[in-house]
């Protein structure tokens, strides 16, 4: 499916070490015009969301070590619209960015649950899969990989629970190691 992209302006390049050094920022883009899209809700209804022009987003937050072979994932690609929609919905999930709170005033919409947001992103990626040789779009494995990564590592993704559990176990192990001689 080919969609007309709204006007999007490149704002900032990725900082050196983005994706593998802590605190490094990725590239940033700005939506130049208003954009509207719909999300399928669990009850079967469609909710329409409006993103005001001027909204800034990072497209696909793909760490730089995945750019190029064999993953072929970069922030730029047919996943621009799914990424715009996902970033906006995640901002709503987090309570809205300063820009959204300032521009939507008292009309900041309620975010869908994280599972709906991530599922919407995955479904929108599949809208851009190309099955014919030479056709514009993304490969099925790219859509699958990006969808799974967002479901795992996006806001409230399942992988964060396991990471937190692993950190807690490591801290318990360290504490036990140092306290062991003092335990009865």
Image (cartoon, rainbow, N blue to C red):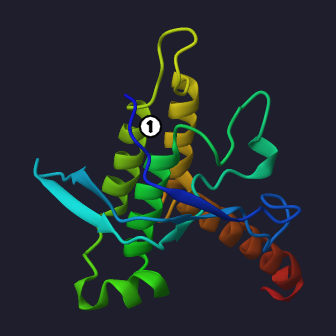
Q: Which residue is located at x 17 percent, y 51 percent?
A: 42
Residue 141 % position (x, y): 57, 25
Residue 104 % position (x, y): 31, 83
Residue 26 % position (x, y): 72, 63
Look at the picture and state if 40 lies above or below 175: above
Residue in the foreground of this view, choosing between 143 and 6: 6
Q: Residues within 10 Å of mark 1 (few under 14, many from 20)?
A: many
Residue corresponding to mark 1: 125
**SS class, disc 1:** helix
Look at the picture and state if 167 lies above or below 126: below
Q: Which residue is located at x 87 percent, y 61 percent?
A: 17
Quarter of the picture holding the N terminus: top left
Q: Which residue is located at x 88 percent, y 63 percent?
A: 16
| Residue 16 in view, yes or no | yes
Left or right: 127, with 168 as reference point: left
Left or right: 132, with 114 as reference point: right
Left or right: 175, with 112 as reference point: right
Question: Which quarter of the figure has residue 48?
Answer: bottom left
Residue 151 % position (x, y): 48, 50
């Amino acid at each position: 499916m080919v969609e007309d992209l709204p006007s999007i302006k490149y704002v900032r390049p990725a900082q050196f070490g983005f994706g593998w050094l802590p605190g490094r920022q990725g590239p940033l883009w700005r939506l130049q015009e208003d954009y509207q899209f719909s999300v399928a809700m669990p009850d079967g209804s469609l909710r329409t969301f409006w993103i005001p022009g001027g909204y800034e987003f990072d497209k696909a937050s793909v760490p730089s070590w995945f750019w190029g072979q064999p993953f072929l994932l970069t922030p730029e690609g047919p996943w621009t619209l799914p990424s715009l929609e996902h970033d906006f919905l995640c901002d709503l999930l987090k309570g809205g960015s300063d820009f959204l709170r300032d521009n939507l005033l008292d009309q900041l919409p309620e975010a869908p649950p994280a599972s709906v947001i991530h599922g919407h992103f995955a479904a929108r990626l599949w809208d851009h899969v190309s099955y014919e040789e030479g056709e514009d779009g993304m490969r099925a494995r790219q859509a699958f990989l990006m969808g799974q990564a967002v479901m795992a590592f996006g806001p409230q993704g399942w992988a964060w629970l396991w990471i937190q559990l692993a950190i807690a176990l490591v801290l318990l192990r360290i504490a036990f190691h140092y306290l062991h001689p003092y335990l009865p």
